Image (cartoon, rainbow, N blue to C red):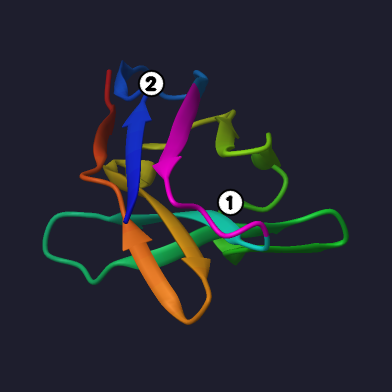
Amino acid sequence: QVQLVESGGGLVQPGGSLRLSCAASGSIPSFNIMGWYRQAPGKERELVASGTGVNINYVDSVKGRFTISRGKNTVYLQMNSLKPEDTAVYYCHLRASGMEYWGKGTLVTVSS
């Protein structure tokens, strides 16, 4: 089993920044892809950013503002120039060996 624990969410004013962290533990396959999804109230969950190196995908709405980075069993999401429409629960995601794992999510609220 793989466990994912997110941290770093909170309340921030428009234009501000937050850094989300996710730590994976358990039986983690050496080859894995980690990323971040989010779900805003009343909307479907969407991919925010995923991958490493040259193989990184960002949803168009966050390009130029968000940056994903990896450690060995960690993934981070640096979020700059935050907008109210970025308000959502952000979920850490790991895919490996045909399996998918999710964290419980961390709430990001962008409001003045």
**Which residue position is annotated with label 1?**
62
**Which residue position is annotated with label 2?**
8
Instruction: Please provide percent x and percent y for residue 95.
Output: 49, 68
Give the residue type that dot 2 points to. Answer: Gly
Classify residue 17 as left or right of residue 10. right
Point 26% across, 35% down: residue: 106
Disc number placed over residue 45 in the picture, else none: none
Q: Quadrant of residue 7?
A: top left
Dot 1 alpha-carbon crowd within 10 angstroms: few under 14, some 14 to 19, many 20 or more: some
In the image, residue 44 lies in the stretch drawn in magenta: no
Q: Is residue 29 above or below residue 111?
A: below
Chain-order first, disc 2 or disc 1:
2
Dot 2 alpha-carbon crowd within 10 angstroms: few under 14, some 14 to 19, many 20 or more: some
**SS for tag 1?**
helix
Q: Which residues are magenta?
A: 19-30
Q: CA distance from mark 2 to mark 1?
A: 18 Å
